[in-house]
Amino acid sequence: MAKTVKILQAPQAGLSDMAKLQDLNVESILENIRQRFEADQIYTYIGSILAAVNPYKTIPNLYDFEVMEAYDKRHIGDLPPHIYAIANDAYYSMWKQTANQCVLISGESGAGKTESTKFILNYLSKMSQASAVETGNDVSVEKCILQSSPILEAFGNAKTVYNNNSSRFGKFIQLAFSSRGVIEGGKVQDYLLEKNRVVGQNPGERNYHIFYALILGAPDEMKQKLGLGAPEKYKYINQSGCIKDPNINDQQIYSDVNEALKDMKLNDEQVSDMFELLGAILHIGNLDFITAGGAQVSSMSVLKQAADLLSVDEYQLANALTEKTRLLRGELISTPLDEHQARDSRDSLAMNLYARCFHWIISRINVRIRTKPTFHSVGVLDIFGFENFEVNRFEQFNINFANEKLQEYFNKHIFSLEQHEYNAEGLDWVDIDWQDNGECLDLIVRKLGLLSLIDEESRFPKGTDGTMLDKLHSNHAKNGFYIKPRVNNSKFGIKHYAGDVFYETTGFLEKNRDTFRDEMLTTIKESRSDFIYDLFEDMQESSQPNAAKKNRKKPTVSSQFQESLHSLMSTLSACNPYFVRCIKPNSTKAPNAFEKTLTLNQLRYSGMLETVKIRRAGFPVRRLFDDFVRRYRPLLGKDTQSSHSQHKCISLLSSYESTNQKWQIGRTKVFLKEDLEIKLERDRAERVETLVTKAKACFKGYRARKAYKATVAKIVFVQKYCRMYRQRRRFLNLKDATITLQRYERGRKARQLFHVMMEERRMEEERKREEQRRRAEEEQRELERLKAEAKLRELEELQAKLEEDARIKAEEEAAKKKREEEERQRVLEKAKAIEAAKRLEEEQAKIRAEEERLKLENELRIRREEEALRLEKEEAERLVEEKRLEEEVRRREEELAYAMQQVMTHFDDSIAQLNSPSDLNLDKYYGDMFEEADQDSEYQDDDPDEDSVSRKSDDLQYWEGYLNMKCGGMVNTWKKRYCVLRDETLMWFRAKQEALKSGWLMKKGGGTSTLSRRNWRKRFFVLKGIELAYYESDSDGAPCKGIINIKQTKDILDSSFGRESSLDIITDKRTYHIVADNADDLSEWFSILMRVKNANEYELKQMQDEDANPKNAIGTLDVAVIDSVVPVHLQTKPNAFAIITAERVFNMSADSPEDMNGWLKALTQYHKGQRTYSKEEILMSGWLTKENTGTISRPGITRKKRYFILTSHSLDIYKSVDLQHKLGAIALNRLCSVTVPDDKMFKEIGTWKFTIHSRRYSYNLFTPSNDEAWKWTYAIQEVIDSKPPIETPSQILIKELREASLNGYNDEIDKIYKLNPILRNVPYMLKSPLLPLPYGQIMSSNLDKGYTTLQDEAVKIFNVLQGSEQLPDPMPVIQGILQTCQDLKPLQDEVYCQLVKQTTWVKDADNLNNLRNWQILCCMCCTFIPSRSILRYVRFHIKRQVELSPKTQMAAYAGYALEALKRTRTREFVPSRDEIIAILGRRDMNATVFCHGGGSCQISINSSTTAGQVIHTLVKGMNLDSCYNRFSLYEKSGLVEKAIDDRSVVADILAKFERFRARGLSDRGKPWQLFFKLFCFLDTQSVKPDSIEYSFLFEQAHEEVIRGKFPATDEQLIHLSALRMQFDKGDYVHGDWINDLTEVYPVDRLKVKPKEDNDFGFQQRDRKDTFISGTLRGIGEKTLKRLQKSASDDNILESVYRDDVSATITAIIDKWRTLKGTSAERAQNIYMSFMRSWKYFGSRLFEVECHDGRQAYPKSIWLSVNKSMVAVHKINDPNPLDEFPYEKILSFGAPIPNEYKIIVEGRRSELTFDTTEVFEIAKLMKAYINEIVKKRNMIPA
C-alpha cells in the first residue's frame, strides 16, 4: 500500500465532508469552507462531489508524487479530500462499473478550473505510466497528452480581469485506456474560441499568451525574420494598456510551447509557418486606412511585411482589404469600401487566420494522440466559467448558455434523477427543493427562443442588431427570466442561475454570421505557403450561382455551438459523472483573502446547500439486487439459505447496520450511503484478499508439486542419458583399441610381404641383366660377320651396277619419249570423254525435271477437282440454308410486327395481358446489330440530325440474379448470365462476380530461361480469393490449366521492358512470365495481385465483397435507352420477357415468375413512352432550340426545337410538352460544363446561345430570352456542382503519397511506386489523361490553333515527351507545349503530372530523354503555378529525386525547378526563345533597358523578375534614391508607349516583344524597347538642375510638348523648339536645317482639319469594342494593325502640310539665330523655367470625350491628372474648367469598356468620359493616391 505522506496526516480543520454537518445551512457551509481555506485545506467533500477553493498561491508538497502514490487505490474518504481522490476513483471505476467516466469541472472564471484539469490529467498519466511499466508498454502517449496543455494554454488562454490564465475556449479531453489501465490515446474537442479577443481586449486584459511569448521569448533571429519589435508597437496587443504581467513568464511560455511542439512531432517548417502566421496577424493589426477614392491602405510597408509572411501578393491583399467584388451577369464588379468596412475586413482576416490556426493545432494534437477503440475512457471537461463583465457581448452570451446547460446537467444528476429514482423505487423519502434553471434554458433554446430569433435575424440580409433587439423585446418582454432595460438602449438581460447579466447587442449578428469575404478567401487560398492554404482549404466561397440560397443554409456560430454542445451533453450522458465545483474566494486574485459575500453567492447559485442536504439524506450508491449480490458475494456467509437476491441483500446489510439508517431496499435496487459502501468495499477487498491468498497458496502448492515432479523426471532423464553416455564411451574406447591392434597387425604383415616381394623383384632383375649381356655379345659377333659379307657383296654389285646403268640409261631415254606421246594421247581422249559425260548428264537432268513437273501438275489438277467438288457441295448446302433462313426471317418479321402491335396496344392496360401464342425469338431479327461487348451509355436520337446522348436514372436501384438471355446472332442459343442492375446500368457477367479480376493474358511457363515464342500461350486468367487460375478459354466449362496460390508466392515483380508490359510471378518451383496487352491492364493486374498477397483475412473479405465491376462485364446496357420492357410467352421459356431499345431486342428468361416480376418492376419505369416526374424531381423545364456541335455536319441539318426537363441527374429531351416521345438525355457529372450566354452571338442571330459539354458531345442551346438563358445556365451549373468530384487513380495515389510523406513512411512510399506503374516512367503511349479533364470541344480565344479536346491534347503532349530526345532543336517543341498549357489552363496540372511520371524511376538519371523532360519541367516551373495538390506533389517529387541522385545533372535541374516554383508568378505569355535558353542553362537572362538620349544598360533578370524590381535596381544604380519624383518602366516602339505595371513580369514583356517582331508589329519599323522614365511628378520645382533627375524631367517635358499635350501658343512653341535646337546642336551655323520637325515641334498644331482617326490618335465612341487597345494590358489588335504601315508614312506630313511645315521651320530657325551664345545648360534652364511657369506642370493630359448631361464641358477635353487632383481643361487651355481633389473623389474606374467614371463628393451627377486609356488614367490616379497616403503617414516613398 502506498506510503501516507506527512501533509496528509495534518489535522483537518472543520469537516472534510460537509454531508456530516450537524447544523445544515448556508452559513455553516461557508464557515466550514473558510476554516479549511485558512488552514490551506482547499478541498472539501460533499459526498463524492469535490469543492475546490482557488488559493491563488502554491501550497507546498500538496501535489507531490508521494501524494499521488498515497491516493492510489484508495476510496473517497480514506484520506483527506483531494483532486487526486476524484481522479483515482474515476480511474478505477472503469473496471468497477465497466463504463466510461467523466469529470465535470465547473465554476466562475478564475476559480481554478484549468489548473484542476491539469492535476487530473497529471494523475491519470502517472497511473498509466505505472501500468505501462508493469506491462512493458511505451509511455509516449501520456507525455503527448500532458505536453498538449502548454500549447492549448498558450494559444487558447489569456489574462482577464478575473484570471491571469483564463481559458477563452472550452475543451473536453477524453483519455482512452486499455484493459490494463494504460492510456492508448485520446481526443481533444474544442468549443467556441473567443476570436474577437485577437483584435480587441477590455482594459486591463491581454490577448492570447502566445503573442506576448513570441515577441518577448523568441530568439532575435526569429524576431528579425518575422519583423517583430517591441510589444508596444502592435495595436492588437497594446490597446488594452496591459502588456506585461509580473505573474506571467512569457519567455518560459515560449520555451514550453517549443518543447511541446517537438513532442507533437511538428517539424521545423510547420513551426516556422505557424509563427509566421502569428507575426502576420500582429502586422495586420497595424494596418490603417484613409479615404482617397475609397479606403486606401495607409502603410504599404506594413502591408508588405504581412503579405510576405502570409506568402501572398501585397497588391492583391490590399485590394481584398479595400474592395468588394460581386458577380453580375458573369462579370466581376469591384466596389471600394469605406474606412470602417476596411477595418472590419482587416479584423475579420486576423480573427479567421488565428481561429483556423488554433483548430489546426487541435487537429495535429488529435492526430498525435489518436487511437483505435479501446476499453473505456475518462473525460475531463474544462469549459469557460460563468462570466459577467461590465460589457458582455456575444461571446459571454454563448459562454453563459453553456454554463446553464452544465448546471442543468448537474441538477439533473444530483437532484432530479436521484429523487425521481427514490420515489420510483418506493423509498421513504421527503423531496428536497432545489433551484431549477429549466425555464431559463427554455428562454434561450426553445422555438422562437433567443437563439432562434438571433439566427433568424442573422439570415436576413437586411437584419441589424437593432431589429434583432426589437424582436427579442417583442417576443420575450413578459418572460420572467428575460430583462428588458428600463432605459431604451442596445442591451437585453437574462436571469441566469448565477445572477442577472445584461448583454450588449452591438455586433451580435456580425459575430453570429461569422462572415469572411470571398475576396479575402481567394487571396489567402492563393498563398504560396502550403500551411496557409491548408488552413482554408475546406472553406468554400459564397460568390457562386444562387449564393444567397446557400448563405441562408450556412450554419451560424450559435447554431454550430449549440450542436457541438448537444453532442457534448450526449457524450456526458453516456458516462458516469464526477463533479468538481471550483470556488473563487476573492475577486482580486489575492492569496489568503476570503470574501464571504462573493463566496456565499457562488454557494447559493451553485445549489451547494441543497447538494449537501441531498448528499446527507440521500443514498447516492444504488445497485440492482443481482448486481449487489454478485459484487459482494465474498461477504455472504455459507449459512445464507435464501435463494432470492433481495433476501440476501437484506441479510448482508443487516449484519452491518441493523437500523436501516444507511441503507434502504427498493423494488429492484439496493440504496446505500457512501460511507457504508466504502465499508463494504473495504471488507470485500479484505475478504477477496484472504480468498485470493488461499487460492494463491493452493496454486503455489500445486505449482511446486508439479515443478518437483518435473524436476524428478528431468533428473531421471539426465541419469538415463548419463549412463547411456558412459556405456557408449566404454564401447567406443574398446572398439578404438581393437581397431588399433588390427591396424598394427595388418601393417606388420604388409611390411613382411613387402620385403619378400622386393627380394624376388631384385633377383628377377639380375637374371634379366645377365640374359641381356649374353644376347648383346652374340649380336656383336653376328654383326661383325655380316659386315664382312656385305663389304664383299658391295664390291661385286658396284661393278654390275655400272654396267647396268649404262644400259638402263639408254632404255629410259627411249621409254621417256614413248611415255610423253602416250600421255598426250591420253589427255586428249580424257577431255573428249569429259565433254561427252557432261552432255549426257544435262540430258538426264532435263528428263528428270520434266518428269517432276508432270507429276506436280497432275497432283494439283487432282486437288483442284476435289476442291471444286467440295465447294459445289457447300454452295448447295448454303443455298438451302439461306432459303430456309429467308423463310425464317420473313416469318419472324411477321411475328415481330404482330408482337409489337400487341405490346403497344395493350401495354398501358396491363403488362400481364401480353401473351403471344407463338415462339417469339425477337433477337434473331436484330441479331446482326449487336455483339456481347461493353455498350456505350449514350444512344441515337431518332431525329436524323441528332447524335447519341445519355441519361441517368433519377432513382438509385440495385437488382441482381441469374437470367437466361439471347442477345446476338440469328442462330444464337440461350445463355445463362449473371445480371446486375446498378447505377442505372444493366450489366451481365458469365457468372456471379466471385472473381476479383479476370481477363486474357499471355503466359510463358517453365523456369526463368528465355523460351521461344512457341512456348507462349494465351490463357484466360481468373483471380478468386488467393488463387489465380488460368484456363484454355473464357467459355463455361473450359479446362483449368493450372492454379497459382498468390499467398505462397515468393515475389511478384513488374518486369516490363521496352514496350512489353509484363510481370513475373515467382514460386518455389517455377517462375510464371505473364504479358498484358497494355500498361493499364498490367497495372491493374499488378495492383490487385499485390493487394491479395499483402492482405489479411479481413481485407481479403472486403475485396471479395466489393460490388460488381463494369470492367469485368461482358455486356452493359444503359437503362436510359430502354424503350419498353414487356413479358412474352415462349413455349420453352415460360418466365420470359423482352427488353426493347431503339436498335435491338433482348430476350430474357427468369427462373421463376417472382424473379421475372422483380426484374420487370425494376426496369419498366425507364421504358420509352410517357415519363412521369414528381414535383421535386423537376428543377427546371421549358422549350429550347438544340444544335449539336463537335460532329460531322451533314447537308440539310437544321436546329430543332425541343422540350427540356432538368433533373438532379440529367437534362432530358422530349419532342413535345406531353413527354410522350423522349429523344434522349444528357447525363450530368462533375466534368460537364456549361458556357454563359453569348452576347456576340445574340448580336449576330438575335437569340441567346449557351453550350453544354457532355462526355462525348457538345450541344448548343438557344433561347430568345436573356433571363431564360441565364436561369438555365445557373440551374445546369448548380446540378454539375452538386455532383461528387471525379478522381482518377493518379489522384488517389498522389493523396496516398502525401499521407505517407507527412507521416514519414518512406517504405510505404517505395511500395506505392513499386505497386503502381501509372506513377512511373513508361516507354509506351498514354491512352488517357492522368487527371480528370473537363469535357467539350476547345474554343481558342484569338484564332483556331487546331485544338480538339483536352483529353486528346493531353495524350498528344505525352507522346511528344516520349520522343523529346530525338529532336535536333527542342525549342519549338518546348514553346509549343508551354503555349498549349497557356491556352488550355486545365492542361497545366496534367502536364506537370506527365513530367513527374516520366522522370520517376529512371534507371539512368542523366540520359538524354530524362534530362530533356527535366528541362521541360524547369520551363513549366518558371511559367505556371500548378494547383495546390499538384504543387505539393511536384515539390515532393523533386526533393525525392534529388535525394536519390544527388550528384547528377538531373539533380541540378531539379534544384533549379524547385527554386523557380518558390518565385514563379502568373504569366501572360509563354517564355521567349532567349528565356528558354537561359532556363536550359540554369542561369539568368540579360535584358536591355533604354532611357532618353540613347543611353542603355544591361540588367540580369529571371523568369519572375518584376518591373518594380527592375526599377528599384535602376534607381539604386543611378543614385536616384533621394529623387523627388517616381520612375516607371515602359514598353516603347517609336511614339507608342505604355507604362508597365510594377507587378508585371519583365520576361512576359520580352516574350511579347518577340511575338510582335515575328508578326511585324511596330511603330514605323522601330524596335520594341524597355524604356525607363518618370511616371509620377510629385515635386517638379525642387529638382536641382545639375542632377540626373533634372535631365529626365527635361526630356519628358519636351516629349509632352512635341506630343501636343502642353498648353502653349504658337510663338511659345516656336521659342521652345528653338531652345531645344540650341540645347541639341549649339549655336546656329549657316545652312543648318531641321530635317525632322516632329522632334522639336508638335506638328499636329499645323493641321487645318484634324482627322477623326489618325495613326495614333484617339478612337471615337463607336470603337468601344477595342477598349484593350492602348491600355496597360497590352497593345490592342486594331492599334497593332495600324502599326504595320510602311515606312513611307513618314513622308505623309511633309506632302500634305509642306507649306506650313516650311514656314514653321523657318520661324524656329530665325528664333534659333537669336539664341547665339547661349550654352546648352542655359538653354535647358530657360526651357524648364518656362515649363515650370505653368501652374499645373507635371500633370498628365489625356484627350477624352465628355458625357455630361448638364453640358458644362465641351465634348472633346483634356483630363488632367496630377499629384493633388484631377482637373478638366479645354484643349490647349492652361486654366482648368474644374478641379477635383482626391479627398473629394469617392470612387473611380471603368464600369464598361472605354468608359471612365469618376464620382465626386457633393456633385449630383457622375463624371463620365470616353477614352481608350482608362487603365492608364486609373493606374496614374491610384499611384498619386498612394503617394498621398505615404506622405500623410510620414513614410518615405
Image (cartoon, helix red, strand yellow):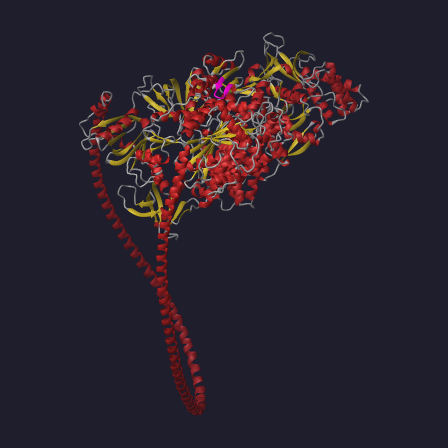
Q: Is residue 495 magenta-colored?
A: yes
State left or right for residue 447 relative to residue 1734. Answer: left
Give the residue at the far right of this rendering.
1717
Residue 1519, percent from left and from top: 72, 30
Q: Quadrant of the C terminus?
A: top right
Q: Is residue 1250 magenta?
A: no
Residue in front for this viewpoint, 1619 or 1311: 1311
Task: Tell me where the magenta segment starts and ends, as one range.
Answer: 494-500
| Main secondary structure along the magenta-highlighted residues | strand
* Residue 1415 to residue 23: above or below: below
- Eyeballing the image, is 1235 above or below 1407? above
| Residue placed most toward the observer, 520 or 1269 | 520
Q: Position of residue 157 (x, y in %)?
A: 55, 29
- Residue nearer the viewer, 1261 or 1164: 1164
Q: Residue at x 41, y 25 (%)?
A: 415
- From the viewer's perspective, is residue 1262 above or below residue 888? above
Give coordinates of residue 502: x percent, y percent: 52, 17
Res. 1093 visible in picture: no
- Residue 754 sits in quarter: bottom left
